[in-house]
Amino acid sequence: MTETVFALVSSWGPLVIFASAFLSCLALPIPTSLMMLTGGAFAAAGDLALWQVVAAAWTGAVLGDQAGYLIGRTGGAPVVERLARAPARAAVLARARALVDRRGGLGVFLSTWAVAPLGPWVNFIAG
């Protein structure tokens, strides 16, 4: 998998980093940390511009968070119920719901940084 990540980042650069950040914010199992580290390594080697790597990661994460919120906002409870059909996702969604109910907007902010595994699920719930 590492070779694939290196090949993708070396060929497509910031676009792959953007897509990785965006899709991971929609709860897709993407190796985003590996993509970010690879992007940083390519930037340190001079193959990519650091500002492009940072801008792609930040833009992908922000737009991905907004897309998750929009999906929850437009789809409402039926989307969350459909996501909760799998037992593992149901448990994570319950934790995300508890965080939003307990902390509100602060919970949404913290889910992005402090409680990152809940981040995508909080976006759906908050919507």
Image (tube, rainbow, N blue to C red):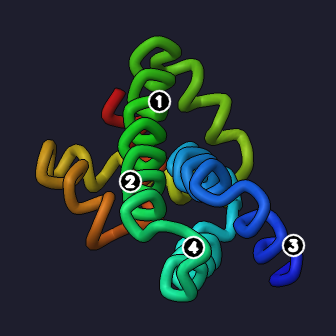
Q: Which of marks 1 and 4 is in front?
A: 4
Residue 4's disc is: 3
CB atoms of marks 1 and 2 within 8 Å: no
Residue for badge 2: 55
Earlier in the chain: of badge 1 and badge 2, it is: 2
Residue 67's disc is: 1
Q: Which residue is drawn at 35% across and 27% down?
A: 127
Residue 2 lies, in percent from the top left, at 81, 83
Disc 1 residue type (three-letter):
Ala
Q: Residue at x 47, y 52 (%)?
A: 56
Residue 26 lies, in percent from the top left, at 56, 43
Binning the other alpha carbons within 10 Å of mark 1 as few (below 14), some (14 to 19) or many (20 upward) gives many
Earlier in the chain: of badge 3 and badge 2, it is: 3
Return the residue found at the far front.
46
Q: Nearer the viewer, mark 3 or mark 2?
A: 2
Is any atom of residue 25 visible in this view? yes
Q: Residue at x 36, y 43 (%)?
A: 62
CB atoms of marks 4 and 2 within 8 Å: no
Side of 54 where 53 appears, left or right: right
